[in-house]
Image (spheres, rainbow, N blue to C red):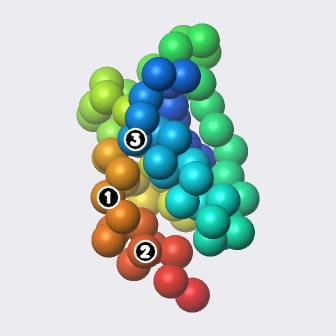
Amino acid sequence: MTVKIYTTPTCGYCNMAKNYFREKGISFTEYNVAQDQRKAEEMIKKSGQMGVPVIEINGTIVVGFDKARIDRLIAV
């Protein structure tokens, strides 16, 4: 499973998402879009959104911390 999370340091929902993945034992790659303009542009291109978090699970985009949708995508 490949999980990417586009975040900013001050985003509470980003922290909730990261903590949720940690609790589930799922590793992820985090991109701080406040510091990395290329990743910010990539996030906008993938999601059409400027807000964070944007979570990519195996190529599927989830905008925001949508726990129910995340659970469906990580179910094995």
User: 71 left or right of 15?
Assistant: left
Instruction: Please state the horizontal and vertical placement of residue 32, each as a whole percent of the image.
Output: 59, 24
What is the secondary structure assignment of the residue under circle 1?
Answer: loop
Residue position marked by numbered label 3 in the rendering: 13
What is the secondary structure assignment of the residue under circle 3?
Answer: helix
The answer to whether residue 68 shows anywhere in this view is yes
Cα–Cα gap, marks 1 and 3: 10 Å
Residue position marked by numbered label 2 in the rendering: 71
Name the residue: 42% across, 35% down: 12
Residue position marked by numbered label 1 in the rendering: 66
> Mark 2 packing: few (<14 Cα in 10 Å), some, or many (20+)?
few
Name the residue: 60% across, 12% down: 35
Q: Nearer the viewer, residue 48 or 52?
A: 52
Q: Are marks 3 and 2 in contact (CB under 8 Å)?
A: no
What is the secondary structure assignment of the residue under circle 2?
Answer: helix
Q: Earlier in the sequence, mark 2 or mark 1?
A: 1
Cα–Cα gap, marks 3 and 2: 16 Å
Q: Earlier in the sequence, mark 1 or mark 3?
A: 3
Instruction: Please state the horizontal and vertical placement of residue 45, each as a whole percent of the image.
Output: 38, 31
Q: Quarter of the image holding residue 76?
A: bottom right
> Mark 3 packing: few (<14 Cα in 10 Å), some, or many (20+)?
some
Q: Quarter of the image holding residue 31?
A: top right
Residue flagged by tag 1: what amino acid is it? Asp
For residue 15, which numbered disc appears in the image?
none
Q: Is residue 57 above or below residue 13?
A: below
Residue flagged by tag 2: what amino acid is it? Asp
> Mark 1 packing: few (<14 Cα in 10 Å), some, or many (20+)?
few
